[in-house]
Amino acid sequence: MKTAILPPNETSLFLAKRLIERGEVVAFPTETVYGLGANAFEDDAVRKIFSLKGRPSDNPLIVHVHESFDYSELIDGEMPYVKALKEAFLPGPLTMIYPSTNKVSGLVSCGLNTLAIRVPSSPAAQAFLRAVSLPIAAPSANLSKHVSPVTAEHVFEDFEGKIPLILDGGACLGGIESTVLDCTGEVPLLLREGLISREMIAKVAGDCKLYRLQRGEKPKSPGLSYRHYTPRCETSYYREDELTKAKDTYLKEEANGGEPYFLCRSEILPALSGMRAFDLGSTAEEMAHRLYYLLREAEKRATLLIGIEPKIEGGASGGVLNRMRRAFGAAE
Ligand code: TXA
Ligand code: MG
């Protein structure tokens, strides 16, 4: 199969609609990362997503809809705090989990009785979702465990010849996946941190708990239990107060004929005295925007990527640190 990469316009959106109606899979940009979308009502279409990605069959998918899509039939009521959250953050990088009416394919939620819904804000995502006018089940458009894609080229790297169409909306502004919030309980429960932080949610909803997986427990969000976002090169990981050790590791790799790179925040660069480094920027939002892009660059150039955990607080820092630790295999 030939994989077309087309900017979203009348012709490509018409093609996207036809492909989705035929049960095919189409990649599309959002404000967070690129998604791999299929008609959420069709078992066979949803099954294709799992097999293309090599995704474990117990890791549920998010359903994406456009801003004025009425999804009240897909969910079985909503908690009182949901209205305020929708007004504050939607459309945007917040996925909310509701009790499901099981109208979409049972494969979407992998047999759970809940449904995750996301209303992305990027104009390209909105245009695609409006054109198809169907709920679209979509995970990030990367092979399972690989780094999530933030450009159409990243999607192409993982799915060339495997999918018919990638809608190219340029680089994603947000850069890390949406915040995932379980809205089925009395208090919203944060399952995956993202650009919208726990503090921002608590301010609007009155409270917000952060979900922590207990040892031996079945995770509420099955995706949380897998290693994720991994670049395809050797990695090691240090704190900012371990720079001496990190530099030793760099020099050893170089002495062995390798090509090591650091990945760190801008403020650390002067201390690395001319060694090769990828610059994450200074704020958590900058880091979110650059992280996956740089991890994909690193795997093309570095034999060893040495991550230096940035000292950051507030805003998107929870989401950034979570992704970074998991990319470097340093998550607790
Ligand atoms: O920003 C994003 O959310 C991107 C773009 C494409 O929208 N999508 C994305 O999808 O990151 P994915 O499949 O890579 O991650 C979805 C996460 C997984 O951790 C999954 O376990 C969780 O959402 N999830 C989905 N449905 C769920 C449900 N019913 N209950 C608990 N967790 C759920
Ligand atoms: Mg993913």
Image (spheres, rainbow, N blue to C red):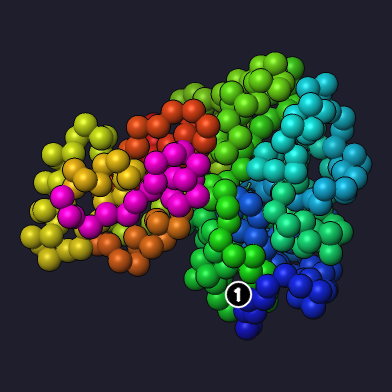
Quadrant of the drawing holding the N terminus: bottom right
Give SS at disc 1: loop
How many neighbours does mark 1 have within 10 angstroms: few (below 14), some (14-19), or many (20 or more)?
A: few
Left or right: where 149 falls relative to 238: right
- Pick the residue in front: 66 or 1: 66
Report x, y in % for residue 53.
57, 61
Give the extent of the magenta segment: 273-291
Residue furthest left in the image: 255
Task: Using the image, determine if residue 79 lies above or below residue 39.
Answer: above
Task: Using the image, determine if residue 158 lies above or below residue 122.
Answer: below
Report x, y in % for residue 92.
70, 43
Task: Using the image, determine if residue 255 lies above or below residue 319.
Answer: below
The residue indicated by pointer 1 is 162
Asked if residue 108 shows in the view, the reply is no
Residue 10 occupies quadrant: bottom right
Residue 198 occupies quadrant: top right
